[in-house]
Amino acid sequence: MLRLLRAVSRIDLTVAAAHGKTYLGAVSTWIAGDDGAARRLGRRIADGEVVSCALTERDHGSDLLAGEVTARPPPAAAGSSTARSGSSTTSPGPDS
């Protein structure tokens, strides 16, 4: 994978960064998620949806194993059934 991204980055760094971001956003689901979640995510990526990783949290820094981020479908926009933006939430920290 690294060799492929390196070769792509020599031609177009933006494309390489976008593919790397997608991989980082999906790899935890592919490794630790259930088979259904991994397949659904793969289909969404193949359909062109944007995937990324919520890496840094106030209480856990960049410790992926301690993260508390969860994802949920976005609420439908008023008057529209095609809302596409995502949202994620974390548990409130002690300073909240």
Image (tube, grey):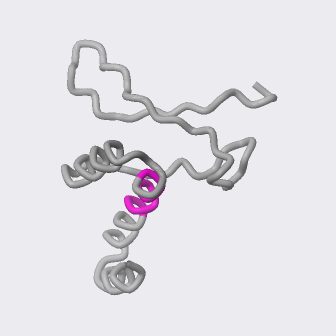
Residue 90 sits inside the magenta stretch: no
Is residue 49 rendered to the left or right of residue 89? left
Question: What percent of the width, then of the height, locates residue 68?
Answer: 62, 39
Question: What percent of the width, then of the height, locates residue 35?
Answer: 34, 48
User: At 40% across and 55% down in the image, what residue appears?
Assistant: 30
Is residue 45 rendered to the left or right of residue 88? left
User: At 58% across and 52% down in the image, what residue appears?
Assistant: 55
Total labels drawn = 0
User: At 28% across and 52% down in the image, what residue appears?
Assistant: 42
Front residue of this view, candidates 50 and 26: 26
Query: Residue at the top extreme?
Result: 79
Question: What percent of the width, then of the height, locates residue 19?
Answer: 34, 66
Front residue of this view, candidates 66 and 85: 66
Query: On screen, 17 above or below 26?
Result: below
Residue 62 lies in what quarter of the image? bottom right
Query: On screen, 21 above or below 69?
Result: below
Magenta span: predominant SS is helix
Give the quarter of the figure containing the N terminus.
Answer: bottom left
Question: What percent of the width, then of the height, locates residue 47?
Answer: 19, 49
Residue 63 lies in what quarter of the image? bottom right
For the magenta stretch, what is the residue range?
Answer: 21-29
Query: Residue at the front extreme?
Result: 35
Is residue 88 rendered to the left or right of residue 57? left
Give the quarter of the figure containing the C terminus.
Answer: top right
